[in-house]
Amino acid sequence: MNTQSNGASAPASRIWLDGALREADGARVSVFDHGLTAGDGVFETLKATNGGAFALDRHLRRLATSARGLGLPEPDLDEAREACAAVLAANPMEHGRLRITYTGGLSPLSSDRGDTGPTLVVALGAAKRRPDSTAVITVPWVRNERGALAGLKTTSYAENVLALSRAHEHDATEALFANTVGALCEGTGSNVFVVLDGELHTPTLASGCLAGITRALTIEWTGAKETELPYDVLDRAEEVFLTSSLRDVQAVHRIHGEAGERLLPGAPGPVTAKAMRVFEERSAAEPNP
C-alpha cells in the first residue's frame, strides 16, 4: 500500500531570500532569526505545476492575514509575488511544493522581536502526485480553538511534527485532531470532510481549524456544509476525505484510532469521487480562482 501523500520535497537549487534570487547552497538565515528561536513566523504552501502556482492570490491574502494575526509587519505581497515567479522560473519542474516563509527576523534570544525587520524566504521542492486514497490516525492531543494562534498558519509546527510522526508509525499519512470541546477539527496539514446521509460536511472555522484554500474551494465548488461535528463522527461517516494544497481532494480508506481500525472499503466513495473530479476540472480551468 502506498501511503505517500505527495512525495518528499527535494529542494531546488535557487531560492529567494530577502529581496533577491540566490543559490540555495549559499543562502543563509541568521541563527538568531525569530522564526528559528521562537517559531515566530507564518508560511504558505502552494501546489506548483509546470511553472505555475495554484491559487496564488488566495495564498498571499492568507499570508497577510496570518502575519497580522501574529502581529508581524504587513508583508510586501508584490515582492512575494515577484519572488514566487522568480523561483518557479529558475527551477523548472513538473510538480512541486512552493513554500513562502515570513518570520520575525533577527531578534534577541527571548520572546521579544528585534527591530531589523522580517525575513522572507521562497523555496521550491519537487513533489509527487498523491494517491487517490490514504490512511489516517486519530491522536489524543487537541487543538485549542480559543488559542492565540487558532486559525493562523504559523511556523509553530512542533505539535504537527509529533502527530505526523505517530501517523507514520501506523502506515498513515495524516493525523486528525479534535478541539478542546471534543469537536472534529483538522489534520496536521489538511482539512477534513465527511459524508453523512449522502451529504458533505466539514468542520466550521469556529472549531479552530485553518481556513484552508483547498477547503474553501471545495465548499464553493461542491456545496459542502460547514457543520459542528463531534469527533466520533469518524466512526460512522459513510465517506471521509482530506483537502490540502498538495493533496487536493484525497479519500481516506483507513482510520486508526485508540479503539482499533476502521476500514472504508471502496474509497473513494461516490461523493468523494465526485468532489475529486469537480476539483480537478475546476482547478485546471481556473489556476488562480
Image (cartoon, rainbow, N blue to C red):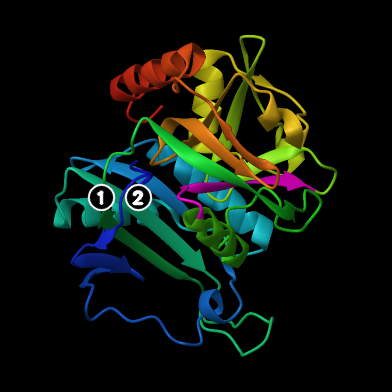
Q: Which residues are magenta?
A: 170-179
Q: Residue 158, position in %: x, y?
A: 58, 67
Is residue 53 found inside the magenta-colored segment of the image?
A: no
Question: Element at badge 2?
Answer: helix
Seen at 78% across and 32% down, the residue is 230
Q: How many circles with numbers are drawn on the protein?
A: 2
Residue 224 sits above or below residue 130 on the image: above
Between residues 162 and 52, which one lies in front from this camera angle? Answer: 162
Q: Residue furthest front?
A: 260
Q: Residue placed farthest to the top in the image?
A: 198
Give above or below for 117 relative to 107: above
Is residue 53 toward the left or the right of residue 140 in the image? left
Residue type at the position of mark 1: Ala
10 Å crowding of disc 2: few (<14), some (14-19), many (20+)? some
Q: Marks 2/1: CA distance? A: 6 Å
x, y (%) of residue 146?
81, 51
- Mark 2 residue type: Arg
SS majority, magenta: strand
What residue is drawn where x is 17% and y is 43%?
94
Q: Which residue is mark 2?
A: 81
Badge number at residue 85: 1
- Visible in this render: residue 210? no
Q: Position of residue 174 (x, y in %)?
A: 51, 47
Relative placement, left or right, of 65 versus 31 is: right
User: Is residue 89 placed above or below 136 in the rendered structure?
Assistant: below
Please determine whether, in this image, residue 219 is positioned above or below residue 65. Answer: above
Mark 2–mark 1 CB contact (< 8 Å): yes
Snapshot quadrant of residue 232: top right
Q: Position of residue 243 (x, y in %)?
A: 49, 34
